[in-house]
Image (tube, rainbow, N blue to C red):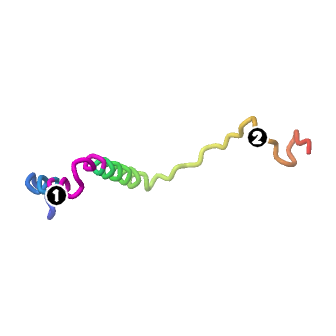
Amino acid sequence: MPFSIGPVELILVLAIALLVIGPGKLPEVGGAIGKSLKEFRHAASDEHDPPSPGPRTVAATDPPQAGTPGDTR
């Protein structure tokens, strides 16, 4: 791996992030990055499995369609 990150580099990146972003926003930014990576990995793994459409259910409160039995129009 040409871009291996050791502990010194990791501490340096975190220190710079702390200075740029600030201690108040750092947890929020870290959480947002983590969620983004999780969604990206999920989307990448589901790319080859498209969801199949499920059966459509009709609620009892739907009005009858024109030309169907029970139509009183």
**Amino acid type at mark 1:** Ile
Rendering coords of residue 40 (x, y %): 37, 54
Dot 2 falls on a residue whose secondary structure is loop
At 35% across and 48% down in the image, what residue appears?
35
**26 within the magenta span:** yes
Main SS class of the magenta portion in the image: helix
The nearer-to-camera label among 1 and 2 is: 1
At 14% across and 59% down in the image, what residue appears?
4
Q: Label 1 to label 2, Cα distance in Å?
A: 59 Å
- Nearer to me, 55 or 12: 12
Magenta range is: 15-28
For residue 52, the mark is none
> In the rendered image, which residue does mark 1 sit on?
16
Question: How many neighbours does mark 2 have within 10 angstroms: few (below 14), some (14-19), or many (20 or more)?
Answer: few
Quadrant, the N terminus: bottom left
Quadrant, the C terminus: top right
Q: How many marks?
A: 2
For residue 62, the mark is 2
Mark toward the start of the polypeptide (1 vs 2): 1
